[in-house]
Image (cartoon, grey):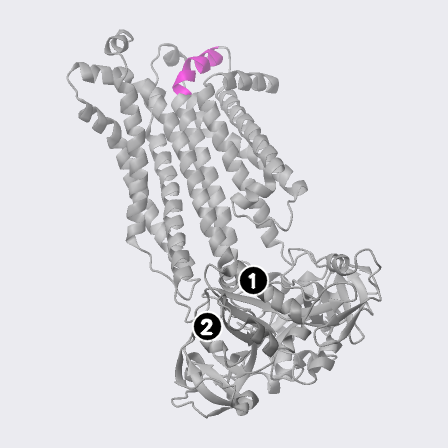
Amino acid sequence: MFSHYIRSFFIHLKKNRFFNALNLLGFAAGFLLLTLISAFVYQETAFDRFHKNADRIYRLHPVGYGVTPACFADKLAGKLPEIRRLVRLSTVDLPIRTKDTRSATIKISYTDPAIFEAFSFPILSGRPENALKSPFSIVVTESLARRLFGDSPPIGQTIQTADTAVLTVTGVMKDLPYVSHIRTQAFVSMETLRLKEENQTFGCGSWSMLTYVELDETADPGSVAAKINELLEAFRMDTGDGKVRLVLEPLADLYFNGEGNRYDGSVHGSRQTVMLYLAVSLLILFIVVINYINLSTALAGNRIRETAIRKVHGASRRQVVIQVMVEAAGMALIAFLGAWILIELLLPQLSGLLNIPLDGGFNRRLLLPACLIGAGVLGAASGLIPGLLLSKTEASSALKDDTPLRSRGGLRKVLLVFQVMIVAGLLNATCLISSQMAYVLKLDLGFRPEQVLSFRMDGALSNKKDLLKRRLAGRPEIGAIAFSDDLIGGGFGQAPIGNEGNKTLCYFLSVDPDYLPLYGIELTRGRNFSWEKPADFADGCLINEAAREAFGLDAPEDKMLDKYRVLGVVSNFNFISLHQAVGPLIIHCSRDGQVAQVRVAAGQEDKAVSLIRQACLGISPDYDFNYTFLQEDLRGHYRAEINLRNSFRFYALIAFLIALLGLFGLTLFVIRKRTREMAIRRLYGANTGQAFRLLTGEQLAIVLTANLLALPVSWWLMDKWLDHFQYRIGVDAAVFVKTLGITLFFNFLAASFLLFRLGRVNLVESLRQL
């Protein structure tokens, strides 16, 4: 029996080749999108789950912060039996120099020896239990070892840092997987940082360390968190509303909780965005299914006699339904295999085109069987409704050409409304996302990021900043130059500032007196730092308006904030992402900045880069000059949203094209069915306008209904998405009017094509067919 179904499927495939081709194209596009997005969703939801102890590892932090002082781990060590291991992490960019290579900057993380016991970061060489016990020991990733030492054995090799410290390689580990929120090229022993920083970092005043806790299998996280809060009562920051409460957040939740870990400097994703991608792919697949059902039910009238003959020969209703479902499943499987072949051949290109980062890999062993089964099931389900309609055919009526199936159209109208509603929703979302990103990228940030080039210096350059400035001064390609300890948009350090009982966690930035003029940052009160005033470098600071308001300083000049003397107040420039409100900022005056920032002349970028490179290499011949432009760095904060915008543009286009394929197919079907009707109307004097209204009236109602249904859903969803931004646009009604115009325009084109085809039909020939 099944072989009979297969033979019938191939016979059906040869008939109505054009309509079957439309269905195959639609299914293939839908499955391609769904497969790639499923791979992306699997990747994003797999973050940090590869660790063997993932279900027992937690991050200790106050809600919303993500960081703690380094002293917390010291004070908890050995105090609670439920805690098996404590691991701290502090990630920085470190300028280095090896024996055989130029200087370079690598990303390293200071951490405790227990990291290799708590986390599953495999060691390839070296002893994990001892690798980070000694001061100035470093464990490098496999790729970094290859980059620094080539084919030479890395164990025992030394790496010199910019501050002349010498690190000894004690181990090599596998590169950290993409699905880890911890991103680093090397782990350096925490004792190294303790010796370098003395008590500056390891006191209880600097909130800049990530602290992880591995609990015993039987431990209750809530109970342990309560005990930790009690033990650290004296050291928890008092904000005026009471002391901050520490929580234990599961490791698997960290990646999607960027809002609850604002200061951790880790990589974060958006669960909302992931679900949005998945929802869009399912909606597009739904459009494909609607296309198939609409075309199949429209063509079902052509199969009534075939079905009646089968029933006369003993076929049951169940067998008719199964036959149609097998045909649909076969078509879906053929389309899926075509989509899979395209993915195998063009995965990097498709991933880039769809703005779906698949750096975590493409899990073929999981995706292929799952998607293959899913395609078959979905295809069979698509054939259920057409199969049920055909199975209701009465053999006697069908053979007399008297069956109600030929006049059915209500189901197609309902499905068309849903189809156009989905397309309208995607168009609404695309327009709103594009408008928000245009607004964000053009927003006045309170400083001038244009034409600012930045680079991190090595030790030799850092010690000769004045010489570097003199060599670049006076060149028309070079404007102002300033130095700071970090770059705007980077991971500024934080520490609690204020009186006992009313402390505020503030961002810290160290700059020289040329910093404010370089960026054009407005000074609203007081004065800027001065090179001629040595006291400014001792205890002088500037605060932003957010800090002034947080501390309630109406006249802040010369007031003391802890050990800092306030010299002036700057405007609330956006030194972090626009996803967040501007927080309190303390700007300290310093000559020790490691990050150089140079304003270059517009149109002279290449020449300016060449001059800066020559000046740097003239001072430090082995320096590895790597630079970025600040505007590009800042755009990186919104890369996820920019990708989402580009993705939605593409998805909306795909959905629109698939819907048009279906509309085009239905249009041709209507042409076949209504040719004689229009011939009779023309015979009785109907003009072109009357014919056009007759053909478009029904479709116009469908488009208007679909847009009205899409409006409230799109409005609500996009308003929720816009709440993700601290600075956002409103939901503009013009977006929905634009979408309505687009959908009406293409509906008009389809109707015009229909009228054009009907107008070319020979009236006499049409009437002869009656």
Magenta span main SS? helix
Q: With respect to residue 125, does 410 lie above or below?
A: above
**46 falls in the magenta region:** no
Type of residue at label 2? Tyr
Of the 4 image quadrants, the one containing the N terminus is top right
Give x and y (percent) for residue 758.
Answer: 28, 19
Cα separation between marks 2 and 1: 19 Å
Hey, which quadrant is residue 528 in on the image? bottom left
Residue name at image x 42 percent, y 31 percent: 291
Residue name at image x 39 percent, y 85 percent: 525
Residue name at image x 73 percent, y 75 percent: 190
Is residue 499 or residue 541 the one in the foreground?
Answer: 541
Give x and y (percent) for residue 510.
Answer: 55, 79
Of the 4 image quadrants, the one containing the C terminus is top left
Which segment did they paint magenta? 300-312
Tell which residue pokes out farthest to the top in this image. 768
Q: With respect to residue 455, does 741 lie above or below?
A: above
